């Protein structure tokens, strides 16, 4: 039974170390120098077509319905 207890504690420690190293790897990957352009591009997605408003779908549907009559 001592072997099982030892292996269980060892696997828990190894799992914790693996998860902590994975976390730091993900953080370093996100903050690497080459990723600034990608993150800035992703942040600008909602504002890409800010120069003109999106078309009103209900108005265009009404115009299409009037044109078909």
Image: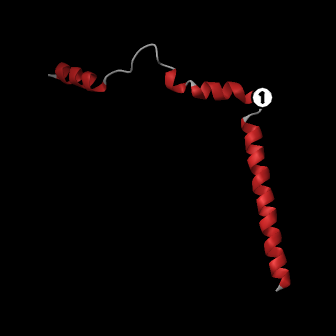
The residue under the point 77% across, 33% down is: 32
Say above or below: 51 vs 27.
above
Residue 24 position within the rendered picture, expressed as x and y whole percent measured from the top left: 77, 46
Residue 45 position in % (x across, y down): 54, 26
In the depicted view, which residue is nearer to us: 50 or 61?
50
- Compared across the picture, whether 53 is left or right of 60 comes to right
Q: Quadrant of the N terminus?
A: bottom right
Q: Mark 1 — residue? A: 33
Q: Residue at image x 46%, y 13%?
A: 51
When asked about the image quadrant of residue 30, the answer is: top right
Q: What residue do we see at 67% from left, 28% from top?
A: 38
Please tell me whether residue 28 is drawn above or below residue 65 in the rendered image: below
Relative depth, front residue between 15 and 54: 15
Question: Which residue occupies 38% across, 21% down?
Answer: 54
Task: Tell me: residue 21, above or below residue 10.
Answer: above
Total marks placed? 1
């Amino acid at each position: 039974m001592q072997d099982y207890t030892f292996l269980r504690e060892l696997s828990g420690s190894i799992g914790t170390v693996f998860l902590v190293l994975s976390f730091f790897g993900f953080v370093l990957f996100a903050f690497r120098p080459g990723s600034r352009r990608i993150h800035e591009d992703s942040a600008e997605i909602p504002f890409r077509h800010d120069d003109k408003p999106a078309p009103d779908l209900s108005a265009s549907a009404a115009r299409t319905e009037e044109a078909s009559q």
